[in-house]
């Protein structure tokens, strides 16, 4: 029964990882870059929400509703103002610029909030849980997170598939030159991809912060989770990212069940095993579709 | 590739028409003499100054080694790794493990380098499945795996680390001096090693890969092999630096020796100094050490400033400070790798055109630049 519990909790945790990873997957799929500050932006969102929730009457929900669109707008600006410039310099520059950004965010948070761990209070949700019988309890928060993850991934998938902007995004991802010929403004499209990525990363950061405590230095660890989920699932495939997140969540909860010290290691080992035996990922995709 | 081809053709033409092909020239001779003198002065320092000074300079040696090795990886082979802290940690722990088996720790530094190269071989088989940006994060995950694996080994001190005790019999002053010389030796070997390596066949292969990976492959360059050799060498050098860190601190903590901050330092130093040049990491390490001394009281602000400088350098000054010095009118080059063609008067160049009078600026080829690598 313990293992069934681990299975359920692992799958639900995987939803959070997938939500967290879809921004990374999207930015890689469209712009072929990895944002090394991805985890730190999530932590930044968590700290801002913490401030908003404690200093204003907005509460955690209000802070979330405010921060997600704010981060999307912020993402557009970061893309147009910084990453786009780095892209024109070369592939190395985007990595270095986002890595520098990661260090800046971590230390700015350390300066502003000290190194103490914080937690975001989601209200009554934190203690409430659904009793499934057999000693298995599922926290409502975990269920909501999983539902949100599936909804966000489905919405992104639909957006890419159906909407005009989504189709142009896919076109720019496949061949920026040809897309430009038929009237796509790659820089604007890249900005939109970054906006989507930043919006989802803020949402994921807040859900993460409600689930477990956070401190300024935790961003890189979370970036690695997201990265592992993307690679396990298969590069550039959003549904693959969901599967990858769930595999990673399962690996971690099973590892923790065996020995708490194995939580992170078992996730890393599954990632390496996929790399060794199925480098294209579980659900490889040819492009962002 | 093209640079060398032009150089070779021009060399043939030069035999007939007195054009010349230069590698370096007077500045290179001067810089070789200058470098030799600088190393001699540095080697003499333990006799002349206090231990606190030599310890600062020892840290500088570690940084030069680390940055040079990262530069070799990222600037020349296009392998941007964010997981080089793996080899710092493994190098440090290797010295610890070897000393448990009775190996003298200073000799252990050499063995640690070899051990890191040996570990890097299977690691590269996994890591090389990822390309570009994904390689960067993949190496980071692998470094975390080594971190956790070392933490699980209780004979090496588990999660809290352990002290190196086999050097306690030595007189502290002598021990510090020997550590300093070992650090100097490792740093000189790294920089000189990079220089010799890049002048040779491997450097030619890497230049070709940088210019066009597919074309290089079709011309017979074993691209993966060239990259793998660089990865192993960088692992060995980084491991040696990690070993020096342990020997100088006499204590190791897994969380700090496997910290990604080490790689952050390598990246900052290399990018600000000038990636893809031999001189850049050395210049960057000098600057970094000075800035660190000046702003040591500023704490967190110092790191914010450094991160911002790295972002700015990556976007607006991609060739770093040395890139400024080596381009434009100055054309400064202390460690020339490429060739410069200086056509003679009336020389017939490779394309068969007769040139009279001062022709257009001769084609030059300096070390690989970061823009097109990777």
Image (cartoon, coloured by chain):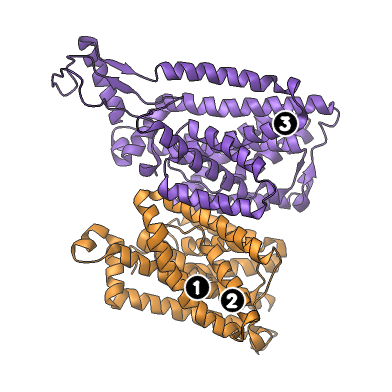
Chain colours: A orange, B purple
Front in this rendered view, residue A103 or A287: A103
| Label 2 or label 1, whichever comes before in sequence order | 1
Front in this rendered view, residue B168 or B39: B39
Quarter of the picture holding the C terminus of chain A: bottom left
In the rendered image of this protein, does residue B214 appear above or below residue B30? below
Q: Is residue B236 visible?
A: no
Q: Is residue B251 visible?
A: yes
Q: Can you identify the residue that label 1 sits on?
A: A19
Question: In the drawing, does residue B47 fall left or right of residue B232?
Answer: right
Q: Furthest-left residue in view? A: B353
Of badges 3 and 1, nearer the viewer stands 3
Give coordinates of residue A163: x percent, y percent.
Answer: 29, 78
- Secondary structure beneath disc 3? helix
Mark 2 and mark 1, same subunit? yes
In the rendered image of this protein, does residue B289 appear above or below residue B344? below
Disc ID at residue A49:
2
Residue drawn at x 35%, y 78% as measured from the top left: A158
Quarter of the picture holding the N terminus of chain A: bottom right
In the rendered image of this protein, does residue B2 appear above or below residue B355? below
**Quadrant of the image occupied by residue A210:** bottom right
Q: Can you identify the residue that label 3 sits on?
A: B53
Residue drawn at x 84%, y 26% as measured from the top left: B170
Mark 2 and mark 3, same subunit? no
Could you give the CA–CA distance between mark 3 and mark 1, rounded to whole angstroms?
51 Å
Q: Tell me if mark 1 has few (under 14), some (14-19) or many (20+) residues whose alpha carbon lies within 10 angstroms of its own.
A: many
Could you give the CA–CA distance between mark 2 and mark 3, rounded to whole angstroms?
46 Å
Question: In the drawing, does residue A70 fall left or right of residue A252?
Answer: left
């Amino acid at each position: 029964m313990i293992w069934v519990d681990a299975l359920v909790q692992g799958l639900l945790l995987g939803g959070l990882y997938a939500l967290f990873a879809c921004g990374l997957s999207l930015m890689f799929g469209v712009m072929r870059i990895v944002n090394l500050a991805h985890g730190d932006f999530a932590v930044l969102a968590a700290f801002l929400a913490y401030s908003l929730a404690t200093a204003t009457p907005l509460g955690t929900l209000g802070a979330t509703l405010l921060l997600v669109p704010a981060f999307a707008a912020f993402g557009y600006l970061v893309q147009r103002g910084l990453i786009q410039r780095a892209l024109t310099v070369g592939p190395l520059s985007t990595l270095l610029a986002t890595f520098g950004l990661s260090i800046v965010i971590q230390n700015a948070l350390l300066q502003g909030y000290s190194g103490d761990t914080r937690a975001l209070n989601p209200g009554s949700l934190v203690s409430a849980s659904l009793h499934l019988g057999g000693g298995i309890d599922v926290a409502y928060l975990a269920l909501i997170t999983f539902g949100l993850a599936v909804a966000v991934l489905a919405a992104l998938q639909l957006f890419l598939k159906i909407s005009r902007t989504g189709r142009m995004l896919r076109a720019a991802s496949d061949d920026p030159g040809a897309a430009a010929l038929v009237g796509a403004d790659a820089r604007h499209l890249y900005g939109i991809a970054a906006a989507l990525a930043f919006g989802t990363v803020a949402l994921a950061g807040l859900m993460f912060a409600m689930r477990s405590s956070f401190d300024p230095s935790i961003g890189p660890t979370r970036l690695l989770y997201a990265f592992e989920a993307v690679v396990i699932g298969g590069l550039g495939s959003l549904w693959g990212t969901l599967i990858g997140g769930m595999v990673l969540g399962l690996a971690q909860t099973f590892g923790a069940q065996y020995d708490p010290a194995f939580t992170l290691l078992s996730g890393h080992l599954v990632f390496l095993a996929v790399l060794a035996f199925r480098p294209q990922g579980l659900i490889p995709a040819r492009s962002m579709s | 590739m093209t640079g060398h081809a032009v150089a070779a053709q021009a060399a043939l033409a030069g035999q007939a028409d007195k054009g010349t092909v230069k590698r370096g020239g007077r500045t290179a001779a001067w810089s070789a003499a200058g470098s030799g003198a600088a190393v001699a002065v540095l080697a003499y320092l333990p006799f002349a100054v206090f231990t606190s000074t030599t310890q600062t300079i020892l840290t500088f040696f570690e940084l030069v080694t680390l940055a040079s090795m990262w530069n070799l990886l990222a600037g020349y082979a296009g392998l941007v790794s964010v997981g080089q802290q793996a080899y710092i940690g493994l190098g440090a722990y290797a010295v610890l493990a070897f000393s448990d088996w009775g190996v003298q720790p200073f000799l252990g530094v050499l063995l640690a380098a070899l051990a890191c190269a040996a570990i890097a071989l299977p690691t590269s088989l996994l890591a090389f499945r990822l390309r570009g940006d994904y390689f960067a994060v993949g190496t980071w995950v692998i470094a975390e795996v080594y971190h956790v694996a070392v933490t699980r080994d209780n004979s090496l001190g588990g999660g809290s680390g352990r002290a190196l005790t086999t050097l306690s019999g030595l007189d502290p002053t002598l021990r510090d001096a020997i550590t300093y010389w070992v650090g100097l030796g490792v740093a000189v070997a790294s920089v000189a090693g990079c220089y010799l390596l890049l002048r040779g066949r491997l450097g030619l292969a890497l230049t070709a890969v940088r210019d066009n990976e597919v074309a290089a492959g079709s011309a017979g360059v074993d691209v993966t092999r060239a990259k793998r050799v660089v990865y192993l060498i960088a692992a060995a050098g980084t491991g040696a630096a990690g070993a020096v860190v342990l020997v100088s601190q006499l204590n190791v903590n897994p969380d700090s020796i496997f910290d990604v901050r080490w790689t952050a330092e390598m990246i900052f130093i290399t990018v600000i100094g000038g990636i893809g040049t031999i001189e850049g990491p050395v210049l960057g390490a000098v600057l970094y050490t000075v800035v660190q001394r000046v702003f040591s009281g500023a704490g967190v602000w110092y790191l914010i400033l450094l991160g911002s400088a790295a972002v700015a350098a990556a976007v607006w000054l991609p060739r770093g400070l040395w890139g400024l010095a080596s381009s434009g009118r100055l054309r400064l080059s202390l460690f020339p790798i490429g060739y410069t063609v200086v056509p003679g008067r009336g020389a017939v160049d490779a394309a068969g055109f007769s040139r009279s009078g001062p022709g257009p600026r001769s084609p030059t080829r300096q070390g690989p630049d970061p823009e097109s690598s990777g």
